[in-house]
Amino acid sequence: MERTGVQDVREVLAAGDTVNDLLAATRVGVTAVGVLTGKLGRADLEVHPHTYIVDGVRDLPALLA
């Protein structure tokens, strides 16, 4: 955030494919996106706090619009 000058966490999206990624994003208040390109499936990620679950990083630009 410092490098880009973003000062509001609501303007940040954090994407990852692990439960820890989702938890870290949620705990700091950014948009938490689970990505299904890792070891975990949708059912595994959906039971944890998240904003979105997407099939892959190619789906991220649509969330930024």
Image (cartoon, grey):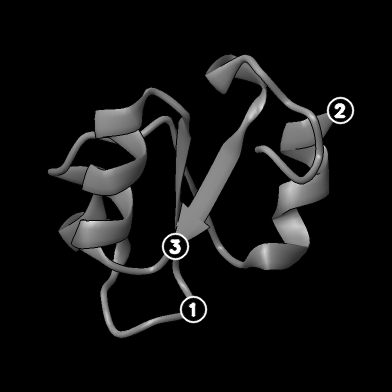
The residue shown at (52%, 47%) is 14
The residue shown at (86%, 27%) is 65
Return the residue at label 1.
37
| Disc 1 versus disc 3: nearer the observer | 3
Along the horizontal axis of the image, is 30 left or right of 2? Answer: left
Q: Position of residue 48 (x, y in %)?
A: 16, 42
Spot the residue most to the bottom: 39
- Label 2 crowd bin: few (<14), some (14–19), many (20+), radius 10 Å: few
Q: Which mark is residue 16?
A: 3
Q: Position of residue 27 (x, y in %)?
A: 24, 31
Return the disc, 3 or 2, that comes first in the chain's sequence: 3
Q: Position of residue 49 (x, y in %)?
A: 22, 34
Along the horizontal axis of the image, is 51 left or right of 59? Answer: left
Q: Is residue 8 above or below residue 43?
A: above
Q: Which mark is residue 65?
A: 2
Task: Classify residue 55 by image quadrant.
Answer: bottom right
Indicate the quadrant containing the N terminus: top left, top right, bottom left or bottom right. top right
Q: CA distance from mark 2 to mark 1?
A: 22 Å
What secondary structure is found at the residue carrying circle 3?
strand
